[in-house]
Image: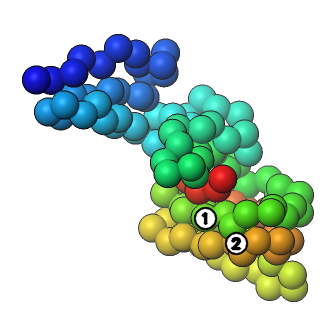
Amino acid sequence: MAVAASCHCGFPWFKPLTLGVFIISLVNLKSAVVQSEAWKSTVLAQVGGANLKVMRMDETPYPEECHHYPEGLLVIDGQLNLTVGADVITVRAGEIFIVPVGVLHAVAPGSCGTLVIFDV
């Protein structure tokens, strides 16, 4: 028996689908960020206790920060110029960078495109 989707969360980029008895979600990442404010993440879902977020990068830098949890940074399109200590790391579309717990990192100018973040 199929279970009907009861909510679309009010977002045009969120599409609940029914697959057998499971409700799954199809999300168009580019549509999810097209009108969002740059560097403001949107939580798409929680998976196994982790947040799955998406954000738009607009070539401006983002200040240094660190977290008490590891953070996965997956570039969907464009590139992320990440400063970790004295190193500048370029993460390109299709690549992921895992920032370890407690490591200071910042976004250097020129980062643009769509970024998916995995954190807790």
Q: Residue furthest left?
A: 1
Of residues 21 and 38, which is closer to you in this image? Answer: 21
Residue identifier under label 1: 72
Visible in this render: residue 54? no
Q: Counting other residues with Cα less than 10 Å from the Cα at mark 2, is it few (<14), some (14-19), or many (20 or more)?
A: some
Q: Position of residue 50 (x, y in %)?
A: 58, 51
Instruction: Decide if residue 40 is on the left or right side of residue 98.
Output: right
* Amino acid, disc 2: Val
* Amino acid, disc 1: Gly
Residue 44, placed above or below residue 69: above
Q: Position of residue 45 (x, y in %)?
A: 51, 39
Q: Quadrant of the N terminus?
A: top left
Instruction: Decide if residue 81 is on the left or right side of residue 84.
Output: left
Q: Residue furthest bottom?
A: 86
Quadrant of the image occupied by residue 35: top right
**SS of the residue under disc 2:** strand
Quadrant of the image occupied by residue 73: bottom right
**SS of the residue under disc 1:** strand
- Residue 56's tag is none
Check whether the beta carbons of the residues at disc 2 and disc 1 lie within 8 A of each other.
Answer: yes
Q: Position of residue 116 (x, y in %)?
A: 56, 53
Residue ID at (87%, 61%): 65
Display colour scheme:
rainbow
Q: Earlier in the sequence, mark 2 or mark 1?
A: 1
